[in-house]
Image: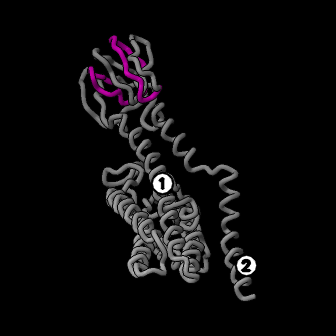
Amino acid sequence: MQNANRTKELHRLSISGMCCPNCAEKIKGAVCKLPGVEKADVNFMQSTLSADINDVQPEQLISAIQSLGYDARVIDDAHGSGGNPEGSNPAEERISRLEIIGVVISALLVGLAGIGSLNDWFWGIRLGLIISAIVICGRSLAWKGLLALMKFQLDMNFLMIVAVIGALFIGEWVEGGVIIVLFAISELLESASVNRSRRAIEALIKVAPQTAIVIRNLVKTTVPVDEIKVGELILVKPGTTISLDGVIRSGRTTINESAITGESLPVSKQQEDKVLAGTINGEGAIEVIVSRGKGDTTLDRIIKLVRQAQSERAPVQSFIEKFARYYTPVVVGLATVIAIL
């Protein structure tokens, strides 16, 4: 009887610190192991977690994520909390800028250390430069690798740590520094690509206004678009953005549809013509009969399709992720056997 009274809830969390799809898989695996979690999905491109849970508090989800070396916070609504769509985090963006500076400095340090030989009188300074570069670029990597090892998960982070330590152990200090710097550069490039995709979705979300002027009983009132139903009449003033899809009942104007269709030139519109949410009205005021409500407009459908495309994995990506799951333990095991022999 107690189980029958349980209510399933959907929680969305914003996750910071993910650097690759493998991170998303680890987080999903950890969350799915929690009692009461029926389903969990991690979207790496959006840095979000969606979980269907029974009798589980969001704090438990956050704790499980933090145990892997990542951070998380609850998203209050579908577009994020605190005015940051798609779970964007200004603090994380500032950290990314610091990481860029750190990688540039590390690359310069390794470059300087590579001049000459480590056996000459300048070797102490070069050694200090290399160690500084490894510390700057490898802190996050070492922490994630250590957490993975504590959970008996030999992932990419652990493999990179072994490679760097191995290079240092055999005296190839410069090569060890180069490995860690190149890995940090690859993470920054991937992060930049992901951030561009996130900003593109944020721009789409911000295209359509959240309020509109609705005409009810000849009275004009500004209301949230969520409260406007299909068939109601809205007024679109010159120079404003159209909130919902609809058909022009009266008025003539030109519409800038570049945000939706990519058409650079304004399109002439008159009575009975269709208009789309997110497009910009020109010089004429128009009255529009709403044909699609909030969440069903052409703009909303575009956003949903983009999110769906980002969350779905290509078959080759799924294969690579499964392959990588066994690749690292096998490589570490073979290397250990060869070293012993």
- In this view, 136 is above or below 269: below
Q: Which image quarter: residue 209? A: top left
Kind of residue at disc 1 = Leu
**What mark, if any, has residue 68 been given in the picture?**
none
Asked if residue 328 is positioned above or below residue 19 in the image, the reply reads: below
Residue farthest to the right? 341
Q: Is residue 119 left or right of residue 325?
A: left
- The residue where tag 2 is placed is 334
- Residue span colored magenta: 234-261
State the image coordinates of residue 45 (x, y, percent, origin top left). Answer: 50, 52
Task: Tell me if residue 4 can be seen.
Answer: no
Residue at 32 percent across and 17 percent down: it is 286
Judge the density around disc 2: few (<14), some (14-19), many (≥20) Cα neighbours within 10 Å: few
Q: Nearer the viewer, residue 152 or 8?
A: 152
Residue 270 at x, y = what percent? 39, 11
| Residue at 75% in and 88% down | 341
| N-terminal label among 1 and 2 | 1
Residue at horizontal 40 percent and vertical 64 percent from the top: 108
Please tell me the numbered disc located at residue 189.
1
**Quarter where residue 164 is shown:** bottom right
Distance from the alpha carbon under mark 1 to that under mark 2: 31 Å
Give coordinates of residue 150: x percent, y percent: 55, 82
